[in-house]
Structure formats: structure tokens, C-alpha cells
Image: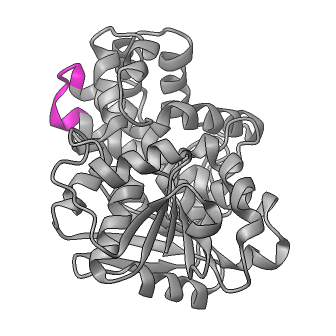
Amino acid sequence: MAIIGTTSWGITLGVVLADKGLEVRLWARTEEEADKLRSKGPDPHLLPGVNFSPQFSVTSSLRQALSSANAVILVVPSQSMRQNIKLIKDHLRGSMLVVSAAKGLEVGSNKRMSEVIADEIDPRFRSNICILSGPNLFREILDGLPASAVVAAGDEAIARKAQKLLTTANFCVYTNTDVIGVELGGALKNVIALGAGMVDGLGYGDNAKAAFVTRGLTEMAALGVALGASPLTLSGLAGLGDLIATCASPLSRNHYVGMELSKGRSLAEITASMNGVAEGVSTTVAVWNIAQKLQLEMPITEKIYRVLYKSVEPRQIITELLGTEGRHELAGHRWGLFSFFRHRRYS
């Protein structure tokens, strides 16, 4: 297994897969970074108590990392996915799985990660693209706590092949063929988590948070349907499962950003102080652009966008959202949710 990306989640995946007995090679961008990881291990403040097994190695050579690998897992921020796939595309071969573990959309193109990867690699390898997503807070997985995920591919046989490689004793991986739904679930829940952090930071209570998160899930499903996903996928591990974990856990970067925004800190100050990327910050831009293009009603995304990029106070937008005039739960401009659950539609 080759892993591209020395992120917390990338190292975590490498550690658990190596402990399973697989040979894992982690690619570091520079020899200096590789040497530091080999000699000192990962940052103890982020990944305390992590030791690399003999099955786990670190290299700055892409050729060495990818040589004879059965799969390459890209665990990089979504905004650098295109840059990274360009680096490795010439090292791919026919049977190698290409697994994205990034949870975001590319700003500018508004594309999902599988689309970004498909843009850059030889068309004969596109059927090997897989998406790994789900409620996977890395610290819990490092501690050996039980967790589940879903791996999606257009071909069920490819998804099962990835499932076999990725499943460990405490990490149960399910399969899905709804690539669009699985990717959107992983990306969109980060936008909702920003708002959930604001609700918590403002002290609005569990009733308000439950309402906010539930309306967020419906909005996620509405966009998913508009882009060709099944709303049932958004109720699965990559949607609802990840949404629960990300909106509830203090380990979530996106939830943290939302809480800090509610305290009056600027977005620039918050992100500059963080280790790692809160994907929801950039994904909000891409989702807002998609909604504008489709003329799709997405009130939560629109209001989170206003907080992040229009300097609107979190208290104002949360109050607006929770005080919006009620109507049918599945009704929204250009939403197609009724077609899945009832014979008639409302707008």
C-alpha cells in the first residue's frame, strides 16, 4: 500500500494497515520530512504514542513508494489533490487501485475528487478509482476503538477489492457503487459541521443543534439528488454517519472553526492557528457556486458562506435559520426529494 500525504489521517491509515500486516510506504514530499518521520515519528501533540511497525516505511521517492503497490491512497487536502495526482499518474499500472480519502470539492471547477483524479490519469485506469469515506476521527482509530467506513467505486468488484485491503479488526469497511453520493456526503457534512459548531458556541442547546443538523442532512440530500446521487446514500455512513461524528465531536476541525467563529475570532486567525485543514471552509465556496448555477435552494450553505466570506455574525445567521418559516420538510426550490419518497412533488 502506498500512501500519499503525511496528514494525520494519512499516517493513521498507514499505521493501522501496517499493523494488519500489509507493507505500507508513506510518501513525504521532501527528504527532510521523510528523515524526520523516520527518526522521530509524527508530531506527538497530534499523534501521541504512535510507533511505526517494521511494515511501515517512509520515503521521499515516488518511484519507491509506488513500486509494486496494490493500491495508492491519496490522503491530501482537496485543494491539492490535482497537484498530487499529477505527480503520481505516470507511476500507475493496470491493477493498482487509486483511492481518494479527501473530503472536499475543488474550488474553481467545483469537481469531486474522483472527477479531479479522472481528469489527470490515463483513461484506462479510471475504473480503479475508489472513494473512502465515513465517520473516521483519526485519534479514535489510532486508539484501537471500533469504527466503520464505506468505500465506493463504480464497479462493485473494484469496491470489494478495496474493502478487502482496507478492512482491519477494528475498522469495518462497507461497499457502495454510488460514488457521487459517498463523495458528496464526505464533503457536504463539513459545511454543516461549521454551522453546528456555531450553534454550540452560541449555547443554543441540543434541541436547536438537532434541528440544525437534521435540516443540514436534508439539504445535503437535496444537492445529492440534483447531482445524481441516491438520497439513501446520504443517510448512510458517508452522509449521516460522518455528519453525526463531525458535528458532535470536539476532535472535528470544522466544528472547532464554527465554535471559534461564534466567539468573534476571524477566519484567517482561526485557520492560521490550526494544525491541519478544515475542509468545510473551501468546500462551502464550491457548494455555494454549484447551488447558484443550479438555482438550488440551499439556505444553510448560503448562510455559512455569508459568515465565512461576507463577515456576517454567526448569531445572525443561526437565528435566521432556526426562525425560518416552516413548510414541508422535503420542500425546497428545485429539490427533487419527493420523487424518491412520494408520488407527487412539492416546491
Query: Does residue 14 show up?
Result: yes
Quarter of the rendering occupied by the C terminus: top right
The residue at 67%/86% (across/down) is 95
- Camera-nearest residue between 140 and 346: 140
Left or right of 258 on screen, residue 122:
right
Q: Position of residue 197 (x, y in %)?
A: 29, 30
Above or below 1: residue 57: above
In reply to whether residue 205 is colored magenta, the answer given is yes
Which range is magenta?
201-208
Q: Position of residue 167 (x, y in %)?
A: 35, 81
- Camera-nearest residue between 48 and 317: 48
Q: Position of residue 65 (x, y in %)?
A: 56, 67
Q: Position of residue 163 (x, y in %)?
A: 45, 83
Query: Does residue 235 show up?
Result: no
The residue at 32%/83% (across/down) is 21
- Camera-nearest residue between 9 and 232: 9
The residue at 68%/36% (across/down) is 107
Q: Which quadrant would residue 324 be assigned to in this image?
A: top left
Above or below 131: residue 82: above
